[in-house]
């Protein structure tokens, strides 16, 4: 897979995962306990991981190639 295609896919995953977080912050999602736990414990960590991958993924790929 080309680097540009991988970046586009990860960017769209990051954007789609941010929608429930916005619902948690600005909507009634915070009052629903099950949905709030999904956002806190599943979606938010995935959002952080994809954000870090978009920001510093090139460094990780370089280190994996060396090893």
Image: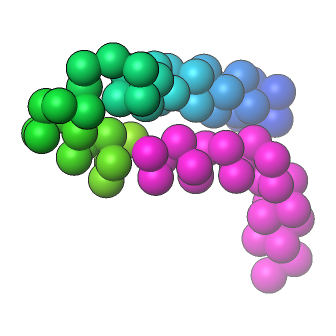
Compared across the picture, whether 47 is left or right of 27 comes to right
Viewer-side residue, 7 vs 64: 7
What residue is rendered at 23% in x and 39% in y?
36
Viewer-side residue, 6 vs 21: 21
Specify the color scheme: rainbow
What residue is rendered at 82% in x and 27% in y?
4
Compared across the picture, whether 63 is left or right of 11 comes to right
Instruction: Give the answer, above or below, for where 46 lies relative to 61.
Output: above
Viewer-side residue, 7 vs 41: 41
Q: Position of residue 19 (x, y in %)?
A: 45, 20
Instruction: Give the answer, above or below, for where 7 lies relative to 40.
Output: above
User: Splitting the image into 4 quarters, where does residue 61 fall?
Assistant: bottom right
Q: Position of residue 67 (x, y in %)?
A: 80, 81
Residue 66 shown in magenta: yes
What residue is rendered at 57% in x and 49% in y?
48
Compared across the picture, whether 55 is left or right of 47 comes to right
Viewer-side residue, 11 vs 43: 43
Quadrant containing the N terminus in the rendered view: top right
User: Splitting the image into 4 quarters, where does residue 21 fall?
Assistant: top left
Residue 34 in sight? yes
Residue 8 shown in magenta: no
What residue is rendered at 67% in x and 44% in y?
51
Q: Position of residue 54 (x, y in %)?
A: 75, 42
Residue 2 in sight? no
Q: Residue furthest bottom?
A: 67
The prevailing secondary structure element of the residues shown in magenta is helix
Compared across the picture, whether 37 is left or right of 19 comes to left
Region in magenta: 44-67
Count of numbered labels shown in the rendering: 0
Instruction: Give the answer, above or below, for where 34 lies relative to 19.
Output: below
């Amino acid at each position: 897979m080309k680097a540009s295609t991988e970046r586009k896919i990860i960017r769209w995953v990051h954007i789609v995962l941010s929608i429930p977080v916005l619902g948690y912050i600005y909507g009634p999602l915070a009052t629903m306990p099950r949905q709030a736990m999904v956002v806190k414990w599943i979606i938010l960590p995935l959002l952080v991981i994809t954000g870090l991958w978009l920001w510093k993924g090139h460094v990780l790929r370089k280190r994996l190639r060396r090893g």
